[in-house]
Image (tube, rainbow, N blue to C red):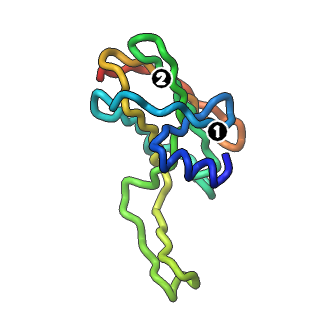
Amino acid sequence: MDREAWEKARNRHLWVVRADSEAAIAPPCHRAPVGPSAEIEWKDHPNHYADPFHDVSIEVTFASPSGQSVRIGGFDYGSRQPPRIKLPPETGKGRPVYEFADQSLWKARLAPSELGSWKYEFTLTNTQGRRASGDANFAS
């Protein structure tokens, strides 16, 4: 998705979802989320990644109570420890730099559109091709 399409989607409050490894714009959500957001955490991973934003990919597929499927990606959340913040001119850049002691926390979030029991399956994959997967459920 190019920047212009992303801006249009954001400005119209459309949800951006992943569809078969391609970014796609979903139709507008006609119903507000009915419960609190669901948040999944993966923490304290023993591996160190030079670029955790790109070295680990997360795919989560949620199944709603009515059987609809929603696929989302997860993201690197940094660390449970606060970062060391380097301010210019120490950074050599015109902006602050945040350094984390470790990058061992990843998350995925969903705002459920239906009440009831949701199921989800997840797969985490790193650049070496190693995978971890599992499933669980939650109630909204």
Measured as percent of width and height from the top left, residue 38 is found at: 35, 32
Classify 51 as above or below 111: below
Measured as percent of width and height from the top left, residue 95 is found at: 51, 78
Measured as percent of width and height from the top left, residue 113 is found at: 37, 25
User: Earlier along the polypeptide chain: callout 1 or callout 2?
Assistant: 1
Measured as percent of width and height from the top left, residue 102 is found at: 48, 57
Count of marks placed on residues? 2
In this view of the protein, which residue sits in the foreground, 67 or 102? 67
Q: Does residue 135 appear to the left or right of 8 in the view shown?
A: left
Q: Around disc 1, counting alpha carbons within 10 Å, would you say few (fewer than 14), some (14 to 19), or many (20 or more)?
A: few
Secondary element under disc 1, as helix, strand or loop, is: strand
Residue 30 quadrant: top left
Residue in the picture at 38% in, 18% down: 118
Of badges 1 and 2, the one in the foreground is 1
Q: CA distance from mark 1 to mark 2?
A: 17 Å
Classify 137 as above or below 83: above
Residue in the picture at 43% in, 42% down: 43
Res 23 label: 1
Secondary element under disc 2, as helix, strand or loop, is: strand
The residue beneath circle 2 is 62
> Which three-letter amino acid code belongs to the residue tagged 1?
Ala
**The N terminus, quarter of image:** top right
Res 134 label: none
> Which three-letter amino acid code belongs to the residue tagged 2?
Phe
Q: Around disc 2, counting alpha carbons within 10 Å, would you say few (fewer than 14), some (14 to 19), or many (20 or more)?
A: many
Classify 137 as above or below 132: above
**The C terminus, quarter of image:** top left
